[in-house]
Image: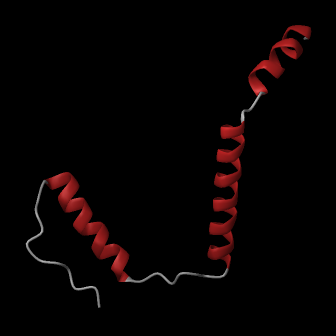
């Protein structure tokens, strides 16, 4: 057991960039969870249309010849 107690602090050190990244990720997840609790933003079909267009471009190699109507 003494082996791990000696090695563990070596791997648990965190630098300033790691600390900043951890703080940013934690705050963004917390903020998103608060938005989900309050049902914001409302989900509509715009995200689905853009997702379909993105899938056609990315996976089928198609080009958009017109824009999907988003209203």
Find residue 64 and report its horizontal and vertical position in percent: 12, 68
Residue 69, compared with residue 28, is above or below; it is below
> Position of 24 compared to 47: left or right?
right
Q: Residue at x 66, y 39 (%)?
A: 17
Q: Nearer the viewer, residue 71 or 17?
A: 17
Q: Residue furthest left?
A: 65
From the viewer's perspective, tell me whether residue 54 is left or right of residue 25: left
Q: Residue at x 53, y 81 (%)?
A: 41
Give how far across and how far down residue 8 sits, in percent.
Answer: 81, 20
Which is nearer the eye, 17 or 10?
Answer: 17
Q: What is the basis of the colouring in this image?
A: secondary structure
Q: Is residue 22 left or right of residue 45?
A: right
Residue at position x 71%, y 38% from top?
16
* Residue at image location 22% in from the left, 54% down from the top: 58
Q: Please determine whether, in this image, residue 65 is positioned above or below residue 14.
A: below
Q: Is residue 62 left or right of residue 11?
A: left
Of the 4 image quadrants, the one containing the C terminus is bottom left
Q: Quadrant of residue 66?
A: bottom left
Quarter of the view holding residue 27? bottom right
């Amino acid at each position: 057991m003494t082996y791990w107690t000696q090695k563990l602090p070596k791997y648990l050190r965190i630098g300033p960039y790691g600390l900043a990244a951890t703080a940013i990720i934690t705050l963004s997840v917390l903020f998103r969870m608060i938005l989900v609790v309050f049902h914001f933003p409302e989900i509509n079909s715009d995200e689905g249309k853009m997702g379909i267009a993105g899938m056609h471009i990315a996976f089928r190699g198609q080009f958009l010849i017109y824009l999907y109507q988003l209203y």
